[in-house]
């Protein structure tokens, strides 16, 4: 520490510029491609994660709040004003929604009173059903992160930032048009916030490594609708 005497008063003066990477995990000093590689490795090897935010895909915007792990996932999805729950245990996917959701899912679900029977139940989704292909990815940690944690174009760093009190380093693709990703400078370099290319959604990531349990719902709460669900 240095001191500078001014009119008889000792005034502290900096002995060089502050280093924003002091006390961090050090990834902020790396080039953008190295940061991306490290954060992808951290994400891939973490046993669990929670993600929340919006994803635009297939012409729709989905609001997600999901907890994911290698053998399953659970959480809520909102799209076009309707909210439903997804649960995947191993390869078995369940969809839980209210009667309004099923009333709007298609004539087959609502025309004969079926919607009322499905209200609040965990409906088994057959793997061959289009709904399985459409929504199972939202419960698959590997598939979802592989699709999301990709920046497009030339990578660069874009300064030090803060996400909910955690210091981060931001990397960008094509100066932000290809997406931005904030990476934790505290401990393991997990991704903490993603802005997708082309304004296709914004997501926050938390609870990295915090395990949770996914279990089959009780038989009384489960409905096996058949080989194919109504289009939703």
Image: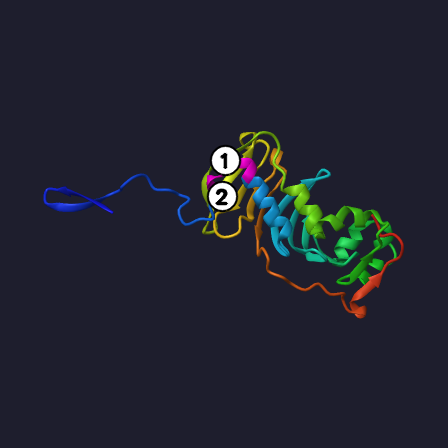
Q: Can you see residue 177?
A: yes
Which residue is nearer to you in this view: 230 or 7?
A: 7
Q: Please say whether residue 77 is one of the residues in the magenta stretch.
A: no
Which residue is nearer to you in this view: 40 or 177?
A: 40
Q: Which residue is mark 2?
A: 27
Task: Indicate the position of residue 26 as horizontal and vertical percent values.
Answer: 46, 45
Q: Nearer the viewer, mark 1 or mark 2?
A: 2
Q: Quadrant of residue 222?
A: bottom right
Q: Which residue is mark 1?
A: 157
Q: CA distance from mark 1 to mark 2?
A: 11 Å
Q: Quadrant of residue 94?
A: bottom right
Q: Please indicate whether residue 161 sits to the left or right of residue 49 in the image.
A: left
Q: How is the image coloured?
A: rainbow
Q: Can you see residue 232?
A: no
Seen as rendered, the residue at the extreme right is: 227
Task: Indicate the position of residue 219 as horizontal and vertical percent values.
Answer: 81, 69
Q: Residue at x 51, y 36 (%)?
A: 31
Q: Please indicate whether residue 170 sits to the left or right of residue 121 in the image.
A: left
Q: Residue at x 75, y 50 (%)?
A: 136
Q: Residue at x 56, y 46 (%)?
A: 191
Task: Indicate the position of residue 213 as horizontal and vertical percent values.
Answer: 68, 64
> Which element type, helix, strand or loop, lies under badge 1?
strand
What residue range appears in magenta? Answer: 28-34
Q: Is residue 72 above or below residue 9?
A: below
Q: Please say whether residue 33 is one of the residues in the magenta stretch.
A: yes
> Which element type, helix, strand or loop, lies under badge 2?
helix
């Amino acid at each position: 520490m240095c001191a500078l005497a001014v009119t008889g008063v000792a005034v502290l003066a900096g002995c060089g510029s502050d280093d924003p990477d002091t006390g961090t995990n050090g990834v902020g000093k790396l080039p953008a491609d190295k940061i991306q590689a490290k954060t992808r490795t951290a994400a891939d090897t973490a046993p669990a994660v929670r993600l929340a935010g919006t994803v635009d895909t297939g012409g729709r915007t989905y609001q997600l709040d999901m907890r994911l792990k290698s053998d399953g996932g659970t959480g809520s999805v909102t799209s076009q004003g309707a909210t439903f729950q997804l649960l995947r245990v191993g390869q078995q996917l369940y969809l839980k929604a209210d009667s309004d959701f099923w009333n709007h899912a298609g004539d087959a679900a609502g025309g004969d009173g079926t919607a009322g029977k499905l209200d609040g139940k965990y409906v088994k989704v057959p793997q061959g059903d289009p709904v399985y292909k459409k929504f199972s990815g939202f419960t698959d940690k590997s598939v979802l992160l592989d699709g999301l944690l990709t920046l497009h174009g030339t990578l660069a760093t874009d300064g030090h930032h803060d996400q909910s009190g955690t210091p981060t380093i931001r990397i960008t693709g094509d100066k932000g048009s290809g997406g931005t990703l904030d990476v934790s400078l505290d401990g393991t370099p997990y991704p903490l916030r993603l802005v997708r290319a082309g304004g296709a959604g914004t997501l926050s990531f938390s609870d990295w490594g915090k395990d949770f349990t996914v279990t089959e719902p009780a038989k009384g709460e489960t409905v096996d609708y058949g080989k194919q669900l109504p289009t939703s």
